[in-house]
Image (spheres, grey):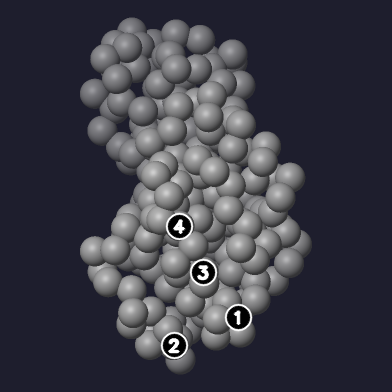
Amino acid sequence: MNPEIQPSLFESIRTDDPGSNEAGSAGLIFERELWSAGIQHIAGVDEAGRGCLAGPVVAAAVICPRECKIDGVNDSKKMSSKTREVARIEIINSALAYGIGICSPEEIDHMNILWAAMEAMKRAVQSLSLRPDYVLIDGNRCFPDSPWPYRTIIGGDARSHSIAAASILAKTHRDHLMQKLDLENPGYGWASNKGYPTRKHYAALDTYGPTKYHRRSFRLR
């Protein structure tokens, strides 16, 4: 049975509704529809690092308290590193539960980046200390065989507060990992580019070749 249940819950939400009712913050419109239907623990899920040449893909899942809204929490890509770090601490301190899921470069090469991202998101939800009653997922795909009812939301990291919180935790966790890997592998610029394709990164690949953290299934030159 498809666990994407109760679509009628969201019939009042326009597909072009930004879901944001405060400037610079993702809203609670999807969460409130679920809360009003008696669904209590809602996990937002997102991933970071899908387009990188090196490093893992990292996902996060966050269950926020009812009506909890942290100012400035939005799509992590629209935030500065400083504001992401401030938000990360606030999210961790206020969340009912949060979890991180990781798929390594080897796993990415084995299953491809799409399925690795799905697997990382599934692992993030599985690692939650509190079982979610419903899952809101950024994008248009859910991981296969989800045991949790879910809704996918295109642009969800800018429209759902729970997903935005997850996007921040995924991004900051991955950034910290890449900064550590940069110390082991100087020259590729990972502390700044976080493994994404840049001129410096490609130049280092031409000079030094790929490391064990590079995704061999990606075009590296």
Quadrant placement of the C terminus: top left
Q: Is residue 145 above or below residue 122?
A: below
Q: Is residue 213 visible?
A: no
- Number of the front mark, 1 or 4: 4
* Mark 1 vs mark 4, CA separation in Å: 18 Å
**Where is 5 relative to 126, above or below?**
below
Q: Earlier in the sequence, mark 2 or mark 3?
A: 2
Crowd band around label 2 with a 10 angstrom C-alpha radius: few (<14), some (14–19), many (20+): few
Residue that badge 4 annotates: 27
Q: Amino acid at mark 4?
A: Gly
Image height of 1 relative to 30, above or below: below
Of the residues shown, which amino acid type is indicated by label 2?
Gln
Where is residue 210 drawn, in percent x and y?
40, 22
When asked about the image quadrant of residue 152, the answer is: bottom left
Q: Looking at the image, which is closer to me, 186 or 137? A: 137
Q: Is residue 93 visible?
A: yes
Q: Is residue 196 left or right of residue 129?
A: left
Residue 39, numbered label: 1
- The amino acid marked with disc number 3 is Glu
Q: Callout 1, which amino acid?
A: Ile
Marked residue nearer the N-terminal end (1 or 3): 3
> Which of the labelled discs sits on residue 31, or is there none?
3
